Amino acid sequence: MRPEIEALLRPDLRGGIPYGAPQLDVPVALNTNENSYAVPPAVVAEITAAVEAIASGLNRYPDREFTQLRQELAAYLSRSGTAVAPEQVWAGNGSNEVLLHLVQAFGGPGRVALGFTPAYSMHPIITTTTGTTWADGMRGRRFDLHVASAVEQVRAHDPAIVFLCSPNNPTGTALGLEVIEAVHEAAPRALVVVDEAYAEFARPGTPSALTLLAGRPRLVVTRTLSKAFALAGARLGYLAADPAVLDALRLVRMPYHLGAQTQAVALAALRHADLMLATVDVIKAQRDRIVEGVREIGCDPVPSDANFVLFGGLADRAATWQGLLDRGVLVRDVGLDGYLRVTAGTPEETSAFLDALAEVMAVQRQGDQG
Ligand SMILES: *Cc1c(COP(=O)(O)O)cnc(C)c1O
């Protein structure tokens, strides 16, 4: 950065590193947990028609309260069996913006947000860019988080916000509801945010924190259309919480933050929720195939409830990452010693990844012997 610009920059941002998953043009991109399947033609037609229908009205600001979208998102969440009312639903340009609204409203200078690392790398970035202090909580050796440890850390930090991530990115594991309940009880002055970006991929019997919302006005569950819903490019994330939390978010959001075209696209996709989610079972099967496949290759997968797998046992993760890239497969280095993260996509992508990994590991083992 030019020194004269750096001198103007907020001191706490100097020397910072921006979020930067590489966007490389490769045959097999398995590094950002998108849904590998394209939007189905029937939904493309509906999206196109929906945008055309609102285009002449783009001279006006959009519905600031995205009323219809909130109704549809509430209906979608309610399909899980837990009734969610439109008054409980908030949305933004990706769940990242929803998280930003939460931290803007409930964090701020002098306040602490606690997360349990490794978790979603944007939680600390959003936290610190709002002048909120980040506290790095810890997980167990296999990235597990149990009640006693979580409660102890919450008490030690006295946070204004606690981030929980379930299923957790980058480890893939879902949290037991007892951990969420215990954290909520141990932090009576905190907003407890459960990031459920990957909820639709969870293995059977993994309950959502939505089931805990009733009677807990300090609990927030965030979701997104970016992952299972195959709509990352549209940028639509949302949350469910007590209506009073939404009133707080209205204090910090920019006016008309959700464009008319975004609302129209999301509504069109939600009208075809079953079609948009049709690939979830295929992807879950690929996830399970990856877990088995990397184990057979001699690596060490972490059990996953998401559309990705963190796998360890890598002597030199940077070399493995590069070896995979040389074979056209882009995975994610999440900064964990000995581990890489791979997204589950199509069966063909899984095969390409497993074949490439087997080759890379064989070459590396030969190198060790030679
Ligand atoms: C991908 C991801 C999100 C989604 O972000 P969007 O802004 O909705 O695209 C949120 N949380 C976690 C943990 C994620 O991995």
Image (tube, rainbow, N blue to C red):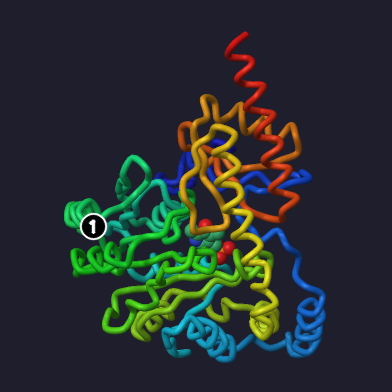
Say whether residue 4 is visible.
Answer: no
| Quadrant including the N terminus | top right
Give the residue at x 64% y 80%.
Answer: 273
Q: Quadrant of residue 76?
A: bottom right
Residue at disc 1, secondary structure: helix
Task: Give the residue type at disc 1.
Answer: Val
In this view, the residue in front, 228 or 19, is 228
| Quadrant including the C terminus | top right
Would you place residue 311 above or below residue 42 in this image?
above
How far from the left and from the top, in percent, is residue 25?
77, 45
Would you place residue 340 above or below residue 106 in this image?
above
In this view, the residue in front, 366 or 78, is 366
Residue to which mark 1 is pinned: 147
How far from the left and from the top, in percent, is residue 43?
76, 79
Give the residue at x 46% y 75%.
Answer: 239
Q: Can you tell me whether the CB of the residue at mark 1 lies under 8 Å from the nearest atom of ligand 1? A: no
- Image position of 204 (left or right of 58): left
Give the residue at x 60% y 42%.
Answer: 293
Crowd around label 1: few <14 · some 14–19 · many ≥20 (10 Å): some
Give the residue at x 61% y 58%.
Answer: 285
